[in-house]
Image: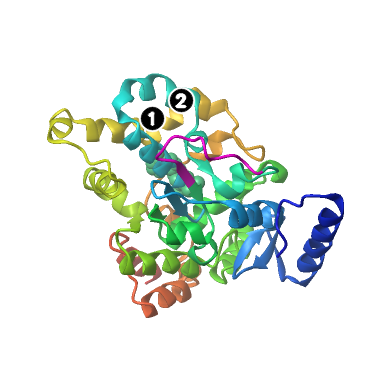
């Protein structure tokens, strides 16, 4: 594909032609009225496919001290952004708790590469003090080469597909363009079929998870693989593991002073949800900050999916199993209990 920052008009026209040709040739689907294209092996929202994704892929230069948070949407990205930022900047913990998290949503503190930084511009990222903290929803196979070849580290967060699906549905029903549509069973069922076939923003689920998981197995210094359910169940141990991986371990003194628990409390769903910036603020143009905080429960899917609907996810579980992956914390018995 052509360079995403054309230098003169003729190059620009040629580039736009190429984009149009490419778009015509790609498989298309819709997700809650938003167009998706199957691009480079994943379902990419058409709105970001050309300029944003390709600009990120073509121009981002990772440095050895960068930290990249990778995730599928609705797997705990916002939570991880608040934790990662706080771990790195915890010398000023009271400043973070009194001012920074009160005036900025976590997405403003750890900027998304394809959804924020490379939107309509080619940002100068060279002056950002190290460690630079970024995030992406792109699958491992499509992230820029420099992320893979440099010594920068990647933290990946996954979440069981059933809760992820329900969370995605709630989020998309609230999208501005959908004008707060009522999420009913028909809509859930229609989108569940798509989700299970991998057709949702940044799907297929198994490809996304397995890409980062395989890399975390082969290269554990490079990729830390976390489960949302693990973070919920053993937050203290997970925060320490995360800080160790990032190169910011907690000292004994900090442990004694309960800094770990303080950070967990500060970045908890309950705490962030109550902050005015997250109740009424709007960081992204398409939705309010409040849509990023809902229930944060494991197993919420049982409130929405019938046992037979839950069976629709078997294929995803099967693909994960065949690749040798099993969730460390998500209790699949819950699924089998519900599907009996
Ligand atoms: P639910 O919709 O199940 O409640 P993302 O940040 O990737 O968009 O994921 C959003 C999901 O994470 C939502 O799940 C949201 O409620 C939950 N979440 C947001 N902040 C959280 C936090 N601080 N702790 C735990 N879960 C959080």
Q: Say which quarter of the image contains residue 91.
A: top left
Please check the rendered image and state whether residue 285 is part of the magenta-colored stretch, yes or no. no
- The residue that appears at 29% across and 47% down in the rendered structure is 242
| Horizontal arrangement in the rendering, residue 19 relative to residue 283 (left or right) | right
What numbered label is drawn on residue 309? none
Q: Quadrant of the C terminus?
A: bottom left
Q: What colouring style does the render use?
A: rainbow
Q: In which quarter of the image is the N terminus?
A: bottom right
- The residue that appears at 60% across and 50% down in the rendered structure is 114
Q: Is mark 2 within 8 Å of ligand 1?
A: no
Pointer 2 local density, CA inside 10 Å: few below 14, some 14–19, many at least 20: some
Asked if the residues shown at circle 1 and circle 2 are in contact, with their CB atoms under 8 angstroms apart, the answer is yes
Q: Where is residue 335 in the image (x, y as percent from the top left)?
A: 37, 66
Q: Say which quarter of the image contains residue 273.
A: top left
Secondary structure mainly formed by the magenta segment: loop
Range of the magenta residues?
122-134
- In the image, 276 versus 6, the foreground residue is 6
Q: Where is residue 10 in the image (x, y as percent from the top left)?
A: 87, 55
Tell which residue pokes out farthest to the bottom in this image.
322
Q: Is residue 121 visible?
A: yes
For label 2, the residue is: 275
Please check the rendered image and state whether residue 132 is part of the magenta-colored stretch, yes or no. yes
Query: Under tag 2, what secondary structure?
Result: loop
Q: Where is residue 281 in the image (x, y as percent from the top left)?
A: 57, 28
Q: Can residue 295 be seen in this view?
A: no
For label 1, the residue is: 271
Vertical order, 173 against 97 (above or below): below
| Horizontal arrangement in the rendering, residue 253 relative to residue 316 (left or right) | left
Q: Is mark 1 within 8 Å of ligand 1?
A: yes
Q: Say which quarter of the image contains residue 156.
A: bottom left
Tell me the CA gap for discs 1 and 2. Answer: 7 Å
């Amino acid at each position: 594909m052509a360079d995403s920052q054309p230098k003169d008009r003729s190059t620009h026209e040629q580039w736009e032609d190429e984009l149009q040709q490419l778009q015509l040739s790609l498989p298309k689907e819709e997700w809650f009225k938003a167009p998706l294209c199957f691009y480079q092996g994943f379902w990419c929202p058409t709105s970001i496919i050309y300029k944003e994704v390709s600009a990120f892929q073509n121009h981002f230069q990772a440095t050895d001290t960068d930290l990249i948070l990778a995730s599928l949407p609705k797997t705990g990205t916002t939570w991880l952004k608040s934790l990662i930022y706080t771990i790195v900047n915890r010398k000023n913990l009271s400043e973070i708790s009194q001012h920074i998290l009160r005036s900025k949503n976590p997405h403003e503190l750890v900027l998304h590469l394809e959804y924020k930084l490379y939107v309509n511009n080619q940002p100068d990222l060279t002056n950002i003090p190290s460690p630079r903290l970024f995030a992406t929803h792109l699958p491992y196979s499509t992230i820029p080469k420099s992320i893979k070849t440099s010594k920068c580290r990647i933290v990946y967060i996954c979440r069981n597909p059933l809760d992820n699906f329900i969370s995605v549905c709630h989020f998309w029903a609230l999208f501005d363009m959908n004008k707060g549509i009522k999420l009913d069973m028909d809509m859930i069922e229609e989108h569940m079929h798509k989700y299970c076939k991998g057709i949702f923003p940044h799907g297929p689920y198994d490809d996304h998870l397995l890409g980062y998981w395989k890399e975390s197995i082969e290269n554990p210094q490079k990729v830390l693989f976390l489960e949302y359910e693990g973070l919920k169940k053993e937050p203290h141990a997970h925060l320490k593991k995360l800080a160790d991986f990032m190169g910011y371990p907690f000292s004994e003194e900090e442990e004694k002073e309960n800094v770990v628990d303080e950070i967990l409390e500060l970045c908890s769903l309950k705490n962030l949800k109550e902050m005015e910036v997250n109740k009424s603020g709007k960081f992204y143009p398409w939705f309010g900050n409040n849509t990023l905080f809902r229930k944060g429960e494991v197993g919420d899917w049982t409130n929405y999916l019938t046992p037979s609907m839950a069976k629709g996810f078997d294929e995803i579980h099967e693909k994960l199993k065949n690749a040798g992956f099993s969730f460390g914390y998500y209790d699949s018995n819950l699924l089998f209990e519900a599907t009996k």
